[in-house]
Amino acid sequence: MSKVKELNFDGQTIFCGLDVHKKNWRVNVRSSEFELEDYSQDPNGELLLDHLKRRYPGAKYEVAYEAGFCGFGIQRTLEKAGVRCIVVNPADVKSSHKEKMRKNDKIDAPKISRELSKGELEPIYIPVAEMEHVRSLVRQRSRLVTDQTRCKNRIWQLLMFSGLKLEADLDKPKQYWSSRFIESLKKMDCSTPWLRQALDLAIEEYLLIRKLLSLATKQIRSLSTQPSFDAIQKLLQSIPGIGIVNAMVIMSELQDINRFKTLDSLCCYAGIVPDTSSTGENEKVKGITHRSNHYLRPAIVESSWVIIRKDPAMLMLYKKYCVAMKENKAIIKIAKHLLSRIRHVWSKQEKYVIGVVG
C-alpha cells in the first residue's frame, strides 16, 4: 500500500468565513462537504494565509467577511496574495431563526463559510483605494454638517431651558447664524457666570465645527477640479439642482455608473424604492425602504426639490404626481427620474438638456 508522503489539496477549494474584530478574528474553515476547523487568531491577513497554506497546501482558497468597521483592507491584502476574498452586506447573509436569536462569533463565522461554500453570498462593490479616500473626505463633510446642526440645536435648547430671550428679530429657530447673531449670543445677560460659561462653550464648539466645515468644503471644491474628476463633475453639475457638493457626493458614492446595469439597480442602491411584502395574491407596499445609501439618498432628494423649480419638465411631472399623492411621496418619484437622468448624462457623456420630458 502506498503512503501519502506529503499533504496535497491540489484541485480542491477551501472556504473560510471570518468574523472580524479589532483584537481578534473568528475563523471557520470548511470544504464543500463539511466543516474542517473553527478557531480564533490575531487580526492579520498574512497570518491567516500562512495557516491555510500550511494546513491545506495546494488548495484554492476563498474567503468572505461582513462589511463593517475594518473596511476593505483585509480584502485587498488577500487579493494581492492571489486569494479570492469577498466582502458581503451582513443583512444579505442567510440566517436561521436560531442564528438571529443567538448571534455571536461562534455562529457568525460558520454561517459565512457555509453560505460561501454554497455560492450563496453576493459581494458588495469594492472601490479603488483612491476613490475610497475621496469618499471618506466627502462623507466627513456630511458628518460635519450634522454636527453643526446638533451644535445649533444644543444652543437653542440651552436658551429655552434657561429662559434666555434674544431680540425679537433674532429669536427664530431658523435664524441665519451670522456674525451679528453670534455676537448677540455672546453679549446676552445670563444672570450667573456659570450659565455664561456653559453658553460660551456651546458657542465655541459651534464656531469650531463651522470652521472645519468651511475647510472641508474648500477641499472638496478643489478636488472637484482635478483632471480625474473634472469631466464627470461638469456633466453632473449641468443638471439643475446639483451643485459642486452634491455632485461630489453622487460621484464618490456611485464610483462607477456602469456597474449599475439597470435603473432599478441604481434606485435600489440609493434607496429610492419601496419596501414590499407579498403573500399569494396580496401585496403590501410599506413606503420608502429603510435600506439605502445614507449619504446618496439625501443628496438626491435635496437636488430633486431644487430641480422642480428650475426644469419645467420636472415641474410638470411633479404636479402630475401631486394630484394622486402627497408632496413628500411625489418628490420621491421625481428623485427616481433624477437618478435616471444622472445615469444618462454620466454613461452617455452628454450634458443635461432642460425641458425634456421622459
Image (cartoon, rainbow, N blue to C red):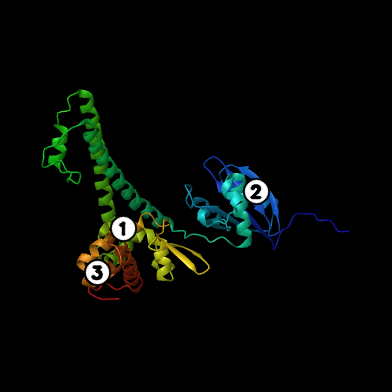
Q: Position of residue 346 (x, y in %)?
A: 33, 69
The answer for how far apart the CA atoms under marks 1 and 3 are is 21 Å
Q: Position of residue 37 (x, y in %)?
A: 68, 48
Do the residues bearing badges 2 and 3 touch, measured as CB atoms within 8 Å? no
Q: Quadrant of residue 236?
A: bottom left
Q: Secondary structure at mark 2?
A: helix
Q: Secondary structure at mark 1?
A: helix
Q: Nearer the viewer, residue 96 or 240?
A: 96
For disc 3, the marked residue is: 319
Q: Position of residue 53 (x, y in %)?
A: 66, 52
Image quarter hosting the C terminus:
bottom left
Looking at the picture, which amino acid does disc 3 mark? Lys
For disc 1, the marked residue is: 299
Does residue 140 lie above or below 308 as drawn? above
Task: Indicate which label's residue lies in the foreground, 1 or 3.
Answer: 3
Q: Nearer the viewer, residue 71 or 187?
A: 187
Identify which residue is drawn at 42% across, 69% down.
Answer: 264
Identify which residue is drawn at 20% across, 44% down.
Answer: 173
Task: Indicate which label's residue lies in the foreground, 2 or 3.
Answer: 3
For disc 2, the marked residue is: 51
Say few, some or many: other residues with alpha carbon within 10 Å of mark 2 (under 14 / 14 to 19 / 20 or more).
Answer: few
Does residue 308 lie above or below 188 as drawn? below
Instruction: Point out the tag, 2 or 1, that comes first from the N-terminus.
Output: 2
The answer for how far apart the CA atoms under marks 2 and 1 are is 45 Å
Instruction: Point out the tag, 1 or 3, that comes first from the N-terminus.
Output: 1
Instruction: Point out the tag, 2 or 3, that comes first from the N-terminus.
Output: 2
